[in-house]
Image (cartoon, helix red, strand yellow):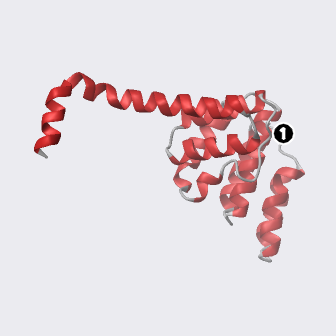
Amino acid sequence: DLQNMQVVHKLGLKSLILTPIVCNTTRYVSTQNLVTDSPSSANYDYLINKAGRDRDFGTVQHLLMKRTRDGCFYTNNTFKFISTDLSVLDDLLKILAGLSHGFPKKSAHDCLVNQLSKLHRTTKALHVAEIMVQNKYGANACTFHPILNELTKKKNMDEAWRVMQVMR
């Protein structure tokens, strides 16, 4: 500990303040290089999930927008980070609302509905689908299919009928 204190003293207070900035900048630059060097859906999924687990929603939004511009589609792994922490759902929905209208916004929401359904969170998935309907994000039968699929597997027909009512 005495050695560490001597190193800290030699470095001074200014270098200690700059260290987190350098680390965050390095992380952002390495993220950018991975996408720039080989933009692919798998690379975007990896980076989005890493940023999502870190609750870095600014980076998530940037990556979602850039992904669309690079022509990389959403996959079943795009929002996998919510499987470990559903409390980020509201933050993620705010990010998705800020995406460009049309295909980018619709497909991101559809992907989230699919992920939530796979996690057996059909109530949350239906909530996202209802947001799509209310805000005219292009919800269609493909949006509701993962929810209905999960509910019918569980033989929960009453809830499936409720989903059908939302679809109308």
Rendered image quadrant of residue 3: top left
Give residue 50's position: percent from left, percent from top.
56, 45
Give the residue drawn at x 80%, y 40%: 73
Q: Position of residue 144 (x, y in %)?
A: 82, 55
In-image side of 131 versus 13 (left or right):
right
Q: Is residue 117 visible?
A: yes
- Mark 1 crowd level (few <14, some 14–19, many ≥20, 10 Å Cα): some
Q: Judge left or right: residue 98 versus residue 136.
A: left
Query: Label 1 amino acid?
Result: Gly
Q: Can you give x and y, in whole percent of width and height, for residue 162 in the image?
A: 79, 62
Residue receiving disc 1: 138
Q: Which residue is at the front of the view, 13 or 165?
A: 13
The single residue placed furthest to the top in the displayed view is 14
Residue 146 coordinates in the image, percent (x, y): 81, 59
Q: Considering depth in this image, is 127 or 42 the residue closer to the camera? A: 42
Task: State whether residue 80 is above or below residue 50.
Answer: below
For residue 23, side relative to residue 27 (left or right): left
Residue in the image at 82% along x and 64% along y: 148
Q: Secondary structure at mark 1?
A: loop
Residue depicted at x 59% and y 52% = 81
Q: Residue at x 83, y 66 (%)?
A: 149
- 24 sits to left or right of 95: left
